[in-house]
Image (cartoon, helix red, strand yellow):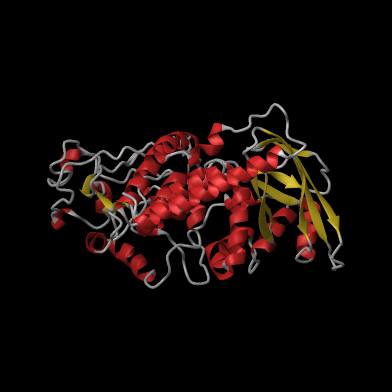
Amino acid sequence: MASPSSSSSFICKTHFLIDLIAILIVSCTHSSQVEAIKAPIRPQDILPLLPRQVSWPLLNSLRGASDLLPSFVGAASISNHSDLQWKGSCFYQNTAWLELHNKSGSEFGGGTLHIKVSNAHSWTCMDIYVFATPYRVTWDYYFLSREHTLEFDEWGGKAEYEYVKRKGVAIFLMEAGMLGTLKALWEVFPLFTNTGWGESSNLAFLKKHMGANFEARPEPWVTNITVDDIHSGDFLAISKIRGRWGGFETLEKWVSGAYAGHSAWWNFELTEDDANPHIALLPLHPDLRSKFNETAAWEYAQSMIGLPYGYHNLIFSWIDTISDNYPPPLDAHLVASVMTVWNHLQPAYAANMWNEALNKRLGTQGLDLPEILVEVERRGSSFAELLAIPEQDEWVYADGKSTSCVAYVLEMYKEAGLFGDLASQIQVTEFTDAYMLNFFENDSSRLPKWCNEGDTVELPFCQIKGKYRMELPGYNSMDPYPHMTESCPSLPPDYSRPDYC
């Protein structure tokens, strides 16, 4: 049952939306440009205002968390006057162009973005847009069929002026509209709450967007393991399904296709982790265990003590291609715009998260994000191509080497000799789903006796914690090969991999 505060919050939102719809109806019915044949009200526009028991099952079939992501429709420039055309969610005929001027009398002047919207499908709809250059991000919404303008009083300097002259202003459409976006926010918010509601929301999200099953296991949900049956090099695959890290893992799984979200240390997961972690032990194959150089692995582990987590390159392990790693409507244009927003809100944070990694891909040093975007365009390349350049394991960042959890474990495997002669041709920082490597036990008779004890379903690995059976699609199925996982697509819900991946 919802708490009183959450119920009152929902009621306030509902009143706001009802008022908004009333304003829209009055405004549209008094507009001389309203088409006579359009529907006065489209049911989908007002579904969020109906009782939750009625509206949410219908909305869930129409909307999802991806509706929080705007889609790129094009760039309005001075060279394509009225040539940029697209179909919106509300207005089906739209054009845009950019006019440069110097109304401010500044050195580089400003500009006016003209957007003409028409042919709305109903009187109650509106389109929401995000507008971006490498130097700024803003937004606006339209519910009247006419020409609208967005003023840029003054460009930030010569660099932005030269950029908009060549490339224009990027336009993104919030395809779900205002009500759909609010509903999508309502779907995403609970993913990060450390509550039963948050856990059920994460499960529902992964079922809906990835096709995960989450079949319940018989109790007890923690296995009494025998430590003597665990050896150096065995892998702990972890899936968290509630709380802050559970929410992040859910979104990470969705974009990457990896069903395990983390690799970590047993003592912490057993005694301190409150994200309801599901944990599986993946024992190394005996042939590889005999080759495992424990001394070399520990030397690498000790060299990483005190270094920060792999935030420099975390997103680059997921992006391998120009377009086939982005769940729609996400794309490289939107990634650039999100980075631009963060660059304004938290410049130091943004610089740590991606600026240094992007500079390494360009072979430059010290460029900030706007300068990176301009440099990419100057070279005749694209930001999508830049993002897809593989991370190199030997890259050292300002604060040391940068590895995520799975890259850290696989780097230990690399140092321990498990990749053999291919070690120099494989970048482990490109991996998101290490459990697919053909490194693990493939004979169930050699698994520990306590493995999957009490479960009626025999898994090919040992689940040692968790209410639901862990799924690891493609488990233990891929032999290492040169440049592995460097150019692989990962589109939901099937995450189909071509033969070379």
Q: Position of residue 400 (x, y in %)?
A: 47, 70
Q: Position of residue 143 (x, y in %)?
A: 68, 43
- Whether 356 is drawn above or below 496: the answer is below
Q: Position of residue 14 (x, y in %)?
A: 49, 47
Residue at image location 67% in from the left, 56% down from the top? 138
- Whether 105 is drawn above or below 374: the answer is below
Front residue of this view, candidates 66 and 4: 4
- Whether 432 is drawn above or below 370: the answer is above
Residue at image location 64% in from the left, 59% down from the top? 362
233 displayed left or right of 91 = left
Q: Is residue 295 visible?
A: yes
Q: Is residue 431 visible?
A: no
Give the total number of marks visible in the rendering: 0
Q: Position of residue 75 (x, y in %)?
A: 73, 47
Residue at image location 31% in from the left, 55% down from the top? 195
* Residue 406 location, quadrant: bottom left
337 displayed left or right of 266 = right
Front residue of this view, candidates 499 and 101: 101
* Residue 18 location, quadrant: top right
* Residue 125 location, quadrant: top right
